[in-house]
Image (spheres, rainbow, N blue to C red):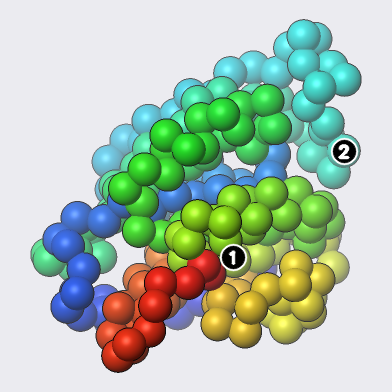
Amino acid sequence: MASNDVSSPPPVTGLPTTVKLLVAGGFGVGKTTFIGAVSEIEPLTTEEIITEASVGIDSLEGVPGKTTTTVAFDFGRISLSSELILYLFGTPGQDRFWFMWDELSAGALGAVVLADTRRLEGCFGAVDFFESRDIRFVVAVNEFDGAFTYEPDEVRAALDLKPRVPVVLCDARERRSATAVLVHLIQHLLAATMTPGSPPAPG
């Protein structure tokens, strides 16, 4: 499993003290796990038991052991430094709850799109959503046990991402690895704000 090293927290020039970020991706990709791993407070979750009512609606292909699903959003908080606090909102992964994404994205400065290489098509919707709303994001490949390992450039090509979009590997269960993803995202946002004359652009 991959575990990225966490560098020193980046300077916060150009960013507010508190930052709202989204954690998005397909059904069962690890969003709730990711937020739970990094949150310094007890994370708020809205997971419910998957029932027969979801049969034929929520596909469990690739995640046969999954028994719960997020029906609203997850929430957590992490302080990267005394000056930079991140508020994390995890989006629901099923198409039937996508009506909530517009409200959740209000005020968000950036996003993490979690990807599962066994079901890479599950994050296409999230990538399209953030690109269409000019919200910068990073793609974090959650390396599940037993899944084939792909290089970041292979994932970039498969998702047809712009060169500037960071692609990193992570283990959503490990605090250090998940925190490193957030550091990459903050650095990505800082690079965008510090580029003279650079207009806002998706990704």
Q: Which of the two residues, 78 or 146, is positioned nearer the viewer here? A: 78
Q: Residue furthest left?
A: 82
Q: How far is mark 2 from mark 1, CA to CA?
A: 21 Å
Going by the numbered disc 1, the residue's amino acid type is Ala
Q: Position of residue 175 (x, y in %)?
A: 43, 59
* As drawn, 90 above or below 72: below
Residue 78 falls left or right of residue 54: left
Q: Position of residue 116 (x, y in %)?
A: 73, 56
Q: Position of residue 165 (x, y in %)?
A: 56, 76
> Hey, which quadrant is residue 200 in on the image?
bottom left
Q: Secondary structure at mark 1?
A: strand
> Hey, which quadrant is residue 157 in on the image?
bottom right
Q: Which of the two residues, 162 or 28, is positioned nearer the viewer here? A: 162
Disc 2 or 1, which lies upstream in sequence? Answer: 2
In the rendered image, which residue does mark 1 sit on? 140
Q: Which of the two residues, 37 or 23, is positioned nearer the viewer here? A: 23
**How dense is the environment of label 1, judged by Cα within 10 Å: few (below 14), some, or many (20 and up)?**
many
In the image, which disc is placed on residue 61?
A: 2
Q: Residue furthest top?
A: 53
Q: Residue at x 70, y 32 (%)?
A: 95
In the image, which disc is placed on residue 166?
A: none
**How dense is the environment of label 2, judged by Cα within 10 Å: few (below 14), some, or many (20 and up)?**
few
Q: Residue at x 74, y 12 (%)?
A: 51
Q: Residue furthest bottom?
A: 196
Image quadrant occupied by the N terminus? bottom right
Q: Residue at x 35, y 58 (%)?
A: 109
